[in-house]
Amino acid sequence: MQIGELAQRTGTSTRALRYYERQGLLTATRGGNGYRSFDDSAVDTVLRIRALLAAGLTTEVIRRVLPCTRGTVPRLEPCAEAVAVLQSEIARMDALATDLALSRRLLASILLDSGVPISPPPRESSTRPPQVGWNLLPQKVSR
């Protein structure tokens, strides 16, 4: 399929698809006319890339993890490097979350000390399980 069809089937811009290709995340062959051609598996690959981007991973990290992903559900094939990379990314995100929470408390303190009321931080509902998985992305897939 050509890049326009892949874009339509995945809800992704052609510009993003070209970027994924430049980053080594997506492979295309070139016809005699110079047009990119993708096989049908590219649809699932693009959806996995988008899900991993939405999870906060960089394209460099995705390049390391992508070969161990399968389907459009959050599954990894046993792959020690991917597990290590994702655990490292979770630790990095936990540290960022801690830093952001501290920054929020400091800003709230400044406002409160100035007599400005603030709203409480948003809380996740404890009655609802957390949403996880590739299916969090809006998917525009037509096969």
Image (tube, rainbow, N blue to C red):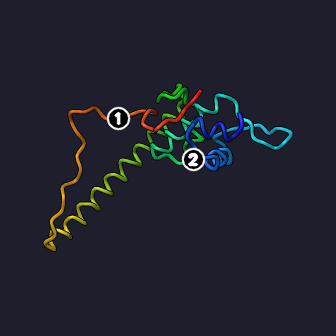
Distance (Cα) linking label 1 and label 2: 23 Å
Report the mark closest to the observer, 1 or 2: 1
Q: Is residue 100 left or right of residue 49?
A: left
Q: Are marks 1 and 2 in contact (CB under 8 Å)?
A: no
Residue at x 50%, y 44% (from the top left corner)? 53
Residue type marked 1? Gln
Viewport quadrant of the C terminus: top right
Disc 2 element: helix
Q: Position of residue 9 (x, y in %)?
A: 59, 35
Q: Residue 31 or 20: which is nearer the viewer? A: 31
Q: Quadrant of residue 130?
A: top left
Q: Could you tell whether 9 is left or right of 122 in the image?
A: right
In the rendered image, the residue lying farthest to the left is 115
Tag shown at residue 114: none
User: Residue 125: x, y in percent?
Assistant: 22, 39
Does residue 136 sit above or below 14 in this rendering?
above
Q: Residue at x 22, y 53 (%)?
A: 121
Q: Residues within 10 Å of mark 2 (few under 14, many from 20)?
A: some
Q: Nearer the viewer, residue 130 or 93?
A: 130
Q: Residue 58 in the image: x percent, y percent?
A: 53, 48
Q: Which residue is denoted by mark 2 in the rendering?
A: 59
Left or right: 32, with 19 as reference point: right
Residue at (28%, 56%) from the top-left corner? Answer: 101
N-term mark: 1 or 2:
2
* SS of the residue under disc 1: loop
> Which residue in the rendered view is the most extreme toward the bottom?
114
Q: Quadrant of residue 33?
A: top right
Q: Which mark is residue 131?
A: 1
Point 41% across, 49% down: residue = 92
Which amino acid is tagged 2? Thr
The image shows residue 21 at horizontal and vertical percentages of 67, 44
Q: Residues within 10 Å of mark 1 (few under 14, many from 20)?
A: few
